Amino acid sequence: MKIVAFNGSPRKTAACATLIESLCAGARAKGHTTRVFHLIDQDVKPCIACYSCMGHKAEICSQNDDFIGMAKEIMAADVVVMASPVYMGQVTGLFKTFFDRWLTFAEADFSIRHVVGKRFVTIVTSGAPAQQFKEVTEYLKHWVGDFFKLKHAGSLVAGDLHEPGDIHERHELLREAEALGRSL
């Protein structure tokens, strides 16, 4: 099984990255392959609503940037992991720009192609208590699951993380992430 993960945090060693790595370690222990994209390292331009993807004028997108390769990875994957810290009550701008480009997986009538039936995992982290940002996980579950028709395979939610290294003290959450990876 192939798992591809997208880290929407600008910090490549903080909570989202650590939870992704724990999940991937569990998945690799079961023989699965994993690939992680740190969106901070990717050149992803904003969607310009040209609809070339919907009209099949472009294979994936009219913009030639790193999203093209990531979209191909999504199409080849069995499981997609989507991770973001909460910034100003929502996913990061990095993550939102990446996610807006998922328009390529929709047809002109908004039926969905290439991703239907794949499984997905959400990871959401914040300095605030987890119950204060549960709507971010619900947002992802709605759009990825209900709209894009992927099957929800699990969610990890980590609150009260005030410093980048705080996640390392959350042993139960790291074990939960690894167990989720093993279950995929």
Image (cartoon, rainbow, N blue to C red):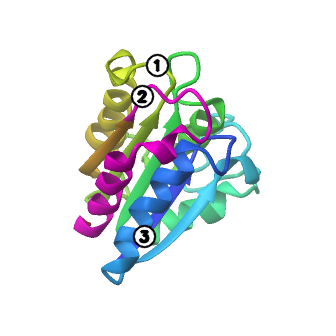
Q: Which label is found at residue 25?
A: 3
Asked if the residue under mark 3 is in contact with the one under mark 2, i.e. CB atoms within 8 Å, the reply is: no
Identify which residue is drawn at 55% across, 60% down: 71
Residue 92 higher or lower than 168, as above or below = above
Coordinates of residue 144 in the picture (x, y in percent): 36, 42
To which quarter of the image does residue 111 belong?
top left
Q: What residue type is labelled 3?
A: Ala
Which of 113/126 is in front? 126
* Segment colored magenta: 158-183
Is tag 2's residue or tag 3's residue first in the polypeptide sequence?
3
Q: What residue type is disc 2 on?
A: Gly
Q: Can residue 110 be seen in this view?
A: yes
Q: Residues under labels 2 and 3: Cα distance?
A: 22 Å
Q: Residue at x 30, y 80 (%)?
A: 30
Q: Is residue 76 above or below residue 93?
A: below
- To which residue does mark 1 refer? 128
